[in-house]
Amino acid sequence: MKFKAPLLTLGAGVLVAGVLYGMNVSVGNDLARNNAAEDQPPPAAATSAAPTPSPTPSAASSAPGDGSGKAAQTGTITYAGAVDGGAASLGVVVHNGKAIAYVCDGKAAEAWMDGEMANGEAQLNSAKLTGKLVATYNAGQIKGTVTAGAKTYTFTLKAVAPPSGLYRSQTSLRKKLDASWIVLPDGTQVGVQNRNGVLQPAPPFDVNNKTAVVDGTNVSIEPTSPASGY
């Protein structure tokens, strides 16, 4: 029993040492965490996405009916209708800047013309200088004056779709029927024929079959354009 006091003293010392060790470990861990936190780089500042640049407006291009006239220089466009006052009818066909026109009163006056249409202006003339057309245009309409012989008309025509347009009897058959027509948007046909040098109203023709009956015989009719001639 003499050894109890020293054993108690030894146990107490061990207990105190354990507590001190635990405290040292805890303090060491805290220091390690603090040092690690100090070594981390500061968080990067949030950056907003750069704004998407607005598209640069492109130059305006010519479009049908925009008034520039440039749109009517490519492809094929047909204008047809009555002149102001209705005394005659007129048809104009333009194909890639080349144009033909035909004016007719359906009785005894007519003129075929051809020439250039560019930059919103048109000037067409007949081979014998008996017809002349001067106008301004765009893809939607043409407006100006046209002369056939001693008569001059003013006009404003709209662009039209087939079967409206210009027609003439087939070249090889003109000894049998030398005639020309304007087909208006409402289907009306206005034309004259030349019979032995005398002009008179042209007979009606079938716009679907493109034939006219002359003395009981079918005569071929063909649409005319700057590409095919007249």
Image (cartoon, rainbow, N blue to C red):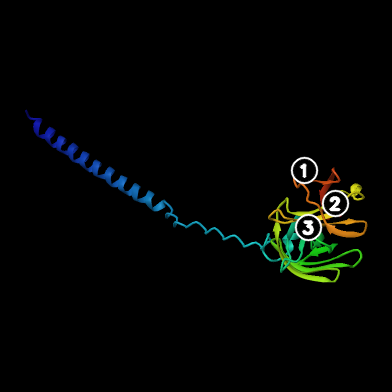
Q: Is residue 177 left or right of residue 119?
A: right
- Disc nearer the start of the sequence (1/2): 1
Residue 228 disc label: 2
Identify which amino acid the numbered label 2 is placed on: Ser
Could you tell me which secondary element the residue under label 2 belongs to?
Answer: loop
Horizontal and vertical percent for residue 164? 73, 53
- Please state which of the two labelled residues, at mark 1 or mark 2, is closer to the viewer: 1
Horizontal and vertical percent for residue 198? 90, 60
Q: Is any atom of residue 72 visible in this view? A: yes
Q: Nearer the viewer, residue 13 or 138?
A: 138
Q: Is residue 136 left or right of residue 11?
A: right
Could you tell me which secondary element the residue under label 1 belongs to?
Answer: loop
Q: Nearer the viewer, residue 210 or 57?
A: 210
- Disc nearer the start of the sequence (2/3): 3
Mark 1 — residue?
209
**Discs 2, 3 touching: Cβ within 8 Å:** no
> Would you identify the image quadrant in which residue 87 lies?
bottom right
Q: Is residue 14 left or right of residue 170?
A: left
Mark 3 — residue?
93
What residue is at 88 percent from the left and 53 percent from the top?
Answer: 178
Residue furthest to the front? 215
Horizontal and vertical percent for residue 194? 88, 57
CA separation, marks 2 and 3?
11 Å
